[in-house]
């Protein structure tokens, strides 16, 4: 039985022919995402804003304003009620009461009793409390971890390859992170520590895919020193396309199943991961490779200086991507 090949061996797609359109789209999406982050902001979870969160599942959909008024009437502070996806589960956030753990437990008991009394059949999952100081530290540490991860990755690629590769990888990672954050600003899905973990995972996946393409580009630059850069980049992307498609598709199928059938508690994490796989695959083809052209990467960049002169280059065989078998 012949193995199934999603991408034929002789695939010859001129991806970079459309690099200007793809880059214009990427820049537009990045600008829109940044604007959404500043204008709409994020629906920060209790991990980042502090307070007390109660999750309750009703027997049917309830009126959110009415539920919020009933909770506030209990004297526990202003209540923020949000429906979890399109289910009968709701998240109720209230300020953390003064008085420590004892006061928090008392407020949680009051809310629980009121929910069971006013909504027969309601199931209260429990309450979670996070102090303002802890939430501030979590937000700061999450932002620092994302920034340091991206800078360390760019530095690693800079040292391993050429400076153009480092800039290309850093911009691709910024592209992926910006679009993911813009998605959460647009949809107002809850942004908590799970989403930070998802963004870090997206960075790792995108980097892995980008390095695979970069390794093949470097290998082909040493092999075809007279080939035009655009043709060489297209060749490298096509040679790694099978691996990219299989990896992205296999992960995407699993994430899609989790998104549809998985528990609500990981809905945001799964949505972030699935989006990250899509935009990470796009950026490794159209963003990280296209930037190398604009940064004037030369075919002789990896040759010793004495061999990179006119004689060294002229002695290499001219090969065209179109003539490749």
Image: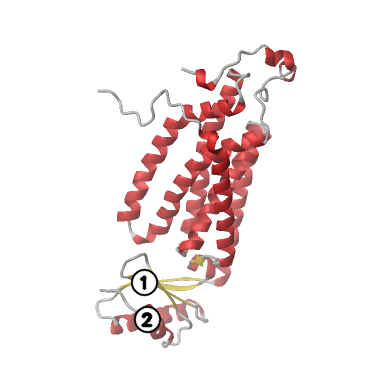
| Residue displayed at 53% across by 71% down | 131
Q: Position of residue 78 (x, y in %)?
A: 48, 82
* SS type, badge 2: helix
Occupied quadrant, residue 299: top right
The numbered mark at residue 298 is none
Report the quarter where the N terminus lies: top left
| Residue displayed at 58% across by 52% down | 145
Residue that badge 2 annotates: 67
Residue 142 is left or right of residue 275, and the answer is right
- Residue 219: tell me if it is visible: yes
The 10 Å Cα crowd at callout 1, few under 14, some 14 to 19, many 20 or more, is: many
* SS type, badge 1: strand
| Residue displayed at 61% across by 43% down | 170
Q: Position of residue 314 (x, y in %)?
A: 68, 13
| Image position of 158 with respect to 121: above or below | above
Residue that badge 1 annotates: 90
Occupied quadrant, residue 277: top left
Residue 126 is left or right of residue 47, and the answer is left
Q: Are marks 2 and 1 in contact (CB under 8 Å)?
A: yes
């Amino acid at each position: 039985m012949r193995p199934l090949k999603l991408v034929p061996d002789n695939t010859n797609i001129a991806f970079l022919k459309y690099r200007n359109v793809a880059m214009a789209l990427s820049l537009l999406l990045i600008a829109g995402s940044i604007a959404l982050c500043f204008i709409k902001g994020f629906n920060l979870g209790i991990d980042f804003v502090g307070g007390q969160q109660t999750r309750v599942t009703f027997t049917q959909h309830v009126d959110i304003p009415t539920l919020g008024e009933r909770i506030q009437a209990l004297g526990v502070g202003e209540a923020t009620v949000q429906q979890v996806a399109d289910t009968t589960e709701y998240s109720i956030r209230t300020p953390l009461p003064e008085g420590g753990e004892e006061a928090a437990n008392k407020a949680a008991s009051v809310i629980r009793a009121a929910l069971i009394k006013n909504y027969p059949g309601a199931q209260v999952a429990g309450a979670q409390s996070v102090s303002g100081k802890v939430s501030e530290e979590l937000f700061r540490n999450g932002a620092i971890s994302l920034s340091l991860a991206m800078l360390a990755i760019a530095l690693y690629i800079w040292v391993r390859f050429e400076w153009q590769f480092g800039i290309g990888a850093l911009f691709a990672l910024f592209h992926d992170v910006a679009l993911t954050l813009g998605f959460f600003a647009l949809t107002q899905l809850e942004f908590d520590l799970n989403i930070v973990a998802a963004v870090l995972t997206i960075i790792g996946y995108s980097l892995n895919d980008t390095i695979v393409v970069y390794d093949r580009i470097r290998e082909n630059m040493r092999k075809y020193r007279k080939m035009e850069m655009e043709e060489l980049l297209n060749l490298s992307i096509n040679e790694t396309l099978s691996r990219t498609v299989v990896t992205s598709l296999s992960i995407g199928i699993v994430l899609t199943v989790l998104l549809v059938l998985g528990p609500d508690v990981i809905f945001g994490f799964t949505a972030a991961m699935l989006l990250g796989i899509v935009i990470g695959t796009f950026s490794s083809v159209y963003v990280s490779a296209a930037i190398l052209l604009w940064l004037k990467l030369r075919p002789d960049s990896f040759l010793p200086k004495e061999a990179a002169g006119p004689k060294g280059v002229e002695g290499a065989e001219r090969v065209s991507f179109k003539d490749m078998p």
